[in-house]
Amino acid sequence: MLEVRYNKKTGEITGWNGDPIQQGNLLVRSEDEEIIILDSNIPKKRIDQLIFDLRASRIVEKPEPLQ
């Protein structure tokens, strides 16, 4: 299980916790953030390369910006 903190407006992941003993210690830092629990392992990519897709209820790679 993976505990994820993300920004509800942007989908940006601002923290995660993959240790089941420590789950519940991740705190919301603003009213725009939410914490969810996913049936997933810790992603192999860096946190700044990922976003939370609310429609799919999963973590996905952040789209590349248009040039």
Image (cartoon, rainbow, N blue to C red):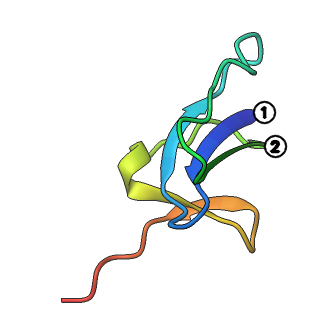
User: Can you tell which mark lies on residue 17?
Assistant: none
Location of the C terminus (image quadrant): bottom left
Give the percent coordinates (x, y) of residue 52: 60, 59
Give the percent coordinates (x, y) of residue 44: 48, 42
Q: Say which element carries label 2.
A: loop
Q: Residue at x 76, y 63 (%)?
A: 57
Q: Which class describes the residues within 10 Å of circle 1: few (<14), some (14-19), or many (20+)?
A: some
Q: Say which element carries label 1.
A: loop
Q: Are marks 2 and 1 in contact (CB under 8 Å)?
A: yes
> If you read the primary sequence from the N terminus, does the residue marked by circle 2 or circle 1 appear first?
1
User: Can you tell which mark lies on residue 39?
Assistant: 2
Is 60 left or right of 40, judged from the image as shown?
A: left
Report the amino acid beneath label 1.
Answer: Met
Which residue matches tag 1?
1
User: Which sits in the foreground, 28 or 38?
Assistant: 28
Distance from label 2 to label 1 (Cα)?
5 Å
Report the amino acid beneath label 2.
Answer: Asp
Residue 32 higher or lower than 24, as above or below: below
